[in-house]
Image (cartoon, rainbow, N blue to C red):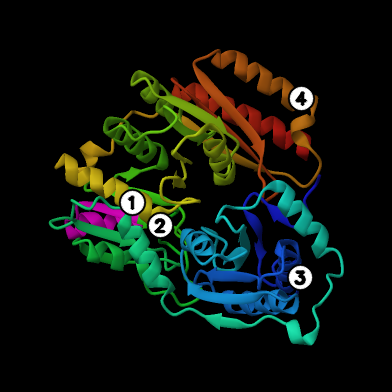
Amino acid sequence: MARKYFGTDGIRGATNGAVMTAEMAMKAGMAAGAYFQRGDHRHRVVIGKDTRLSGYMLESALVAGFTSVGMDVVMLGPLPTPAVAMLTHSMRADIGVMISASHNPFADNGIKLFGPDGYKLSDEAEESIEDLIEQNVPLVPSGKIGRARRVDDAAGRYIHFAKSTFPQALRLDGLRVVIDCANGAAYKVAPAALWELGADVVAIGVTPNGTNINDGVGSTAPQTLAETVVASGADIGIALDGDADRLIIVDETGAVVDGDQLMAMIATSYAREGRLAGGGLVATVMSNLGLERHLAAQGLGLIRTKVGDRHVLEAMRTRGYNVGGEQSGHIILSDYARTGDGLVAALQVLAELKRAGAPASEVLHRFDPLPQLLKNVRFAGGKPLEHEKVQGVIAAAEAELAGRGRLVIRPSGTEPVIRVMAEGEDKRQVETLVDRICDVVREVAA
């Protein structure tokens, strides 16, 4: 079934555009509220947000939508996505909402929904809510309209939770840590948690003004973090994105460490401690072949899924794994969290750094990645990947790699773009194959 509103991670778009309007947010609140009202108890929804200017508008609209169908609303204020998932479950809410467009620029915003268990919704649930958005959802009688209130200690609850995932016997004394919060949702909680655990904290990206989220800072722009780590003589740098559900690390030399290396480190440390479930980890088709080979050399497996942390988590739950994630930095540790949690993942990295007593550049470099190249081809319409010319060039490229590399070619779930990725042992060959495929896609899409 084609989706009209939901993409790979909730509803997302330019604010005051076709999808992300106050009217749309109110309808989404009404629809989700109606869908999750089951039973005679007083129903509750918790709402968090990042620091975007449009968050106020969308929050107010969602509150109107939920209360109009009889749900009580608890507003958490600026808080990471994983905190909303955690509080949805711990507060016995029927639904959780995070207002964020993650790593996108401030002009975009989005609505992420969590069920009462704190997990993101299934495709079936999202499709049902889409159907309700298109209908006239019945309003409750005036005496049953929901109430709304703010919770002032939500940040403190999340800080306490995050610290509880750090080994009790360890402290961060003696470590200088630069934390880049992307001027986003974790701008208060992440530096506070690190300081309370004993770290010497240098905080950047902690002055949100409504329009500077992810602007030259955060996990998608780690250069500022790298420069700050080197200039301050820090032991390690941590970069979160706008809603703090993804993590990128910078070592003491300023080198960027991606999610593949972090997953390798966490999985191998868990295996050493006898706490790795499933005998390996779950990643997406975008993770580097070097990760797969590294794990295999240690007798560990790698399960690959479609792109999207939701698909990773689904495979983890189905197959009994407790470590998974994406190359982009979504790290899911299901012993602790129900979604990607940048701060919790960072604390596992810091714990291993303290145990090893070695520089981050040694601890975090687990394998040499194979040459990998990703390019995007924008198209106006149609289905370029179904064209016989495109299928022919893809088949020829796969035959040329012949087990010495991989191709991943897929349409984006959020924009009219074809993503073409190749990796292999020969960098020049990888570049040639990607360019060849992109040229044919452009030709048939013109």
Q: Residue 181 lies in what quarter of the image?
A: bottom left
| Residue 405 within the magenta-colored segment of the rendering | no
Residue at the image point whose x is 79% and y is 29% from the top: 387
Local secondary structure at mark 1: helix
Mark 1 and mark 4 residues within 8 Å of each other at the beta carbon: no
Local secondary structure at mark 2: strand
Which one is in front in this view, the residue at disc 2 or the one at disc 3? 3
Task: Say whether residue 53 is visible.
Answer: no
Disc on the earlier residue, 1 or 3: 3
Q: Amino acid at mark 4?
A: Lys
The residue carrying mark 3 is 27
Q: Distance between the Cα atoms at labels 1 and 4?
A: 45 Å
The residue carrying mark 4 is 389
Which one is in front in this view, the residue at disc 4 or the one at disc 3? 3
The residue carrying mark 2 is 240
Disc on the earlier residue, 2 or 1: 2
Q: Is 297 left or right of 39, judged from the image as shown? A: left
Task: Point out the stretch of residues depicted in magenta.
Answer: 222-238
Disc on the earlier residue, 4 or 2: 2
Q: Is residue 235 above or below residue 113?
A: above
Disc on the earlier residue, 4 or 3: 3
Q: Residues within 10 Å of mark 1 (few under 14, many from 20)?
A: many
The residue carrying mark 1 is 346
Q: Residue 293 lies in what quarter of the image?
A: top left
Can you tell which mark lies on residue 36?
none
Mark 2 and mark 1 residues within 8 Å of each other at the beta carbon: yes
Q: Is 295 left or right of 420, judged from the image as shown? A: left
Q: Distance between the Cα atoms at labels 4 and 3?
A: 43 Å
